[in-house]
Image (cartoon, helix red, strand yellow):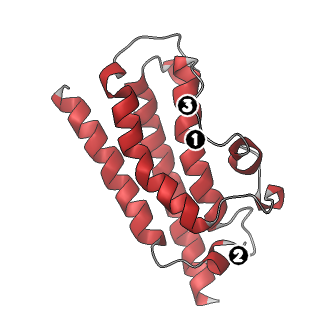
Amino acid sequence: MKKRHDILFTQLETYRGYLLDVVADVTEEEANIIPSGFNNNIRWNLGHVYLDQYLWIEAVTREKIDYPGAFLRWFNFKTSPSDFTAETPTVAQLKKLLEQQPAWIKEAYGHRLEEEMAPTEMGMCTIEHVLSRTIFHEGMHLQAIIDLKKLVISS
């Protein structure tokens, strides 16, 4: 693996660690609160970060990834906690999935980072491009979670 790929996976693992540290002490009850002015809650943001990474890998590879199918109904773009059911993963389950995801991606795609495929949005045509994008996206949701946590914990 090239040095820049090692750095990419270090970033993916490090930023995921930041996310998990921020939510380490968040309870199920707190994670389900939607403060005034917000459309989603911490639980939705966690599931969305997890799903988004796989959706972008699927978009560039055109290969199906085996994540729970109902994740699309619960955590896809333009969904909300109102779409949740009794089967929607708990925060504890989402934390575990998020913890495992970087290693799974590295194992499954680490050797294919530069493989050229049909371009997607913004001309992304490799898994390396997609991971750069999803790390940025995760940072945006990390900030949303930090903001939500401040409001939820202080209420």
Hey, what amino acid is under mark 1? Asp
The residue that mark 2 highlights is 33
Hey, what amino acid is under mark 3? Trp
Circle number at residue 52? 1
Hey, what amino acid is under mark 2? Ile
Badge 3 density bin: few <14, some 14–19, many ≥20, Cα 10 Å: many
Badge 1 density bin: few <14, some 14–19, many ≥20, Cα 10 Å: some
Residue sticking out furthest to the bottom? 155
Which quadrant of the figure has residue 153?
bottom right
Which badge, 2 or 3, comes first in the chain's sequence?
2
Secondary structure under tag 3 reads helix
Q: Are marks 1 and 3 in contact (CB under 8 Å)?
A: yes
Instruction: Judge whether 155 appears above or below 10 on screen.
Output: below
Q: Residue at x 75, y 58 (%)?
A: 87
Q: Residue at x 57, y 26 (%)?
A: 58
Secondary structure under tag 1 reads helix
Whole-angstrom CA distance, mark 2 to mark 3, is: 28 Å
Instruction: Judge whether 10 appears above or below 29 on screen.
Output: above
The residue that mark 3 highlights is 56
Q: Is residue 69 left or right of residue 9?
A: right
Secondary structure under tag 2 reads loop
In percent of width and height, residue 79 lies at 77, 49
Instruction: Judge whether 98 appears above or below 63 on screen.
Output: below
